[in-house]
Amino acid sequence: MGAVTVTDLQARQIREQRLKGCGYKAIASAVGLSRDLVRNYCRSNGLDGHAEVLAADDQAHRDIRCPNCGKPLTQPRTGRRRKFCSDACRRSWWSAHPATLQRSEGALYQMTCICCGKTFIAYGNQNRRFCSRSCYIQNRFRRSELS
């Protein structure tokens, strides 16, 4: 006995009914496939889980727009949901909203620059020695000129 495959029409019907909140058994009887085949198709295509939650999630993700430029986003069928339309929009938005970053208080280190003596806060790097790139350059390449 050969393997039963899902046709494009059946796949479209499964997706539509699953997003409406129908269960595997109801979809199987409507499409004419076994419940296990419908369940396996749903699992492999990101349609598994509780049908009501899946339907609510699909509705919530239909009108998602890029927070930076406002373009509507097209979500991938599988994988992580997109939040921005491009990398440029993502970088621009996070540059404009640094206060929304969730930073751990334990990763903030108060340091003193070994070049200029200025106190600065370093995030996530307790071995940092300079407050800026210009202090690093000055210490590294112009130290011999100052002596």
Image: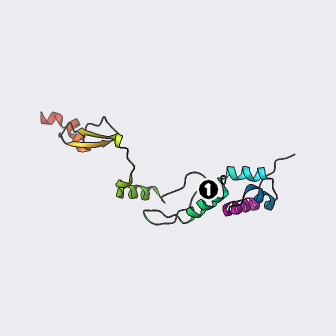
Secondary-structure class at tag 1: loop
Q: Which residue is mark 1?
A: 77
* Dominant secondary structure, magenta: helix
Q: Range of the magenta residues? A: 1-20
Q: Nearer the viewer, residue 3 or 142?
A: 3
Residue sitting at x 59%, y 59% = 57
Q: Is residue 97 in sight in this rendering? A: yes
Q: Position of residue 122 (x, y in %)?
A: 30, 42
Q: What amino acid is found at the position of numbered circle 1 in the picture?
A: Arg
Residue drawn 85% across the image and 47% down it? 2
* Screen quadrant of the N terminus: top right
Q: Residue at x 72, y 52 (%)?
A: 41
Outermost residue to the right: 1
113 to the left or right of 1? left
Relative to 11, 72 lies left or right: left
The answer, for residue 7, to whether it is visible in the render is no
Q: Looking at the image, what colour scheme do you see? A: rainbow
